[in-house]
Amino acid sequence: MKLHYLTFPIFALLVLASGCTDNPTSCDCFEPSTDAFPATLGSSWTYVVHDSLRNTRDTVRVGITGTVKDAEFQTLYVWEYRWSNRVDTEYVAIDRDTVFVFDAIRGKRGEVKTVYEFPLYTGKKWWNRYFNDTVTVSGISAVSTPAGVFPRCFVLVSEWGGFNEYGRYTTWFYPKVGIVHMTRKEWGFGMKNEMWELIDFLIPTVLG
């Protein structure tokens, strides 16, 4: 089963004119750098997570709680996901125009789970870990959440598949805030139909 959080893993489209994909810097569909990805210590997000197949509802508090040293990336940000019955941890690294999200296994960096490639613009596509694991920026859309209305989110569609296992995650990513809404559907060994909604957040660089 593939696990993505915000990363980490951010999620009717207001599709921009086709000229934007040819020259993304000519319009406001362009998000130029990894500065759009929140990475400030002390930042936190709270989500309500519904799974219609399992008939469950939970609240997840996500926080950037610290950093660790790494030989390849120098600094890894520690992201904690506090569920009602467990705590999950991921490491996030920022390298030039790319954000990498890793499993955290016994305090060490594991394999890559998710990749975000900047700049973001409508029509852009990249690969995560495998050839059949792709992310596409499908457009820009407004979304309303309990935390507020976010007018221009980049809609990221992640599709992946393997041996009897397939998934499609749609993420609404708002620059400098992160993921504000997300749907996660999986078919195969583990069935899932989740919806994540942001209900509260605190980002010092945004609120300060």
Image (cartoon, rainbow, N blue to C red):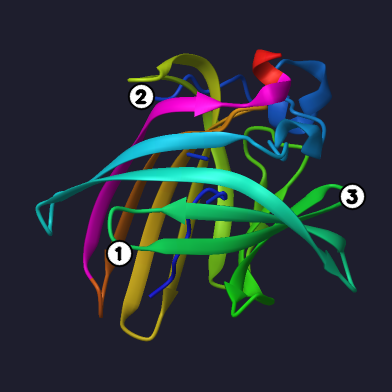
Please report the residue visible at 54 percent of the width from the left and 63 percent of the height from the top.
89
> What separation in Å lies between label 2 and label 1 (alpha carbons)?
22 Å
Whether residue 203 is in magenta: the answer is: yes
Which quarter shows the N terminus?
A: bottom left
Q: Main secondary structure of the magenta part?
A: strand
| Residue at x 69%, y 33% (from the top left corner) | 121
Callout 2 amino acid: Ala
Q: Which residue is mark 3?
A: 96
Question: Of the numbered discs in the image, which one, if any, rests on residue 34?
Answer: none
* Inter-mark Cα distance, 1 to 3: 31 Å
User: For the magenta stretch, what is the residue range?
Assistant: 191-205
Residue at 28%, 53% (x, y): give it: 84
* Residue located 73% across and 36% down the image: 40
Name the residue tied to disc 1. 186
Mark 2 vs mark 1: which is more N-terminal? Answer: 2
Q: Quadrant of residue 106?
A: bottom right
Kind of residue at disc 1:
Glu
- 158 vs 18, left or right, is left
Q: Quadrant of residue 131?
A: bottom right
Above or below, 113 against 154 in this view is below
| Label 1 residue SS | strand
Q: Quadrant of residue 142?
A: top left
Residue wearing tag 2:
12
Q: Tell me the quadrant of the picture where the C terminus can be found.
A: top right
| Element class at badge 3 | loop
Sequence-wise, the earlier of marks 1 and 3 is 3
Percent x, y of residue 14: 48, 19
Spatial separation of the CA atoms under disc 3 and disc 2: 32 Å
Amino acid marked by disc 3: Arg
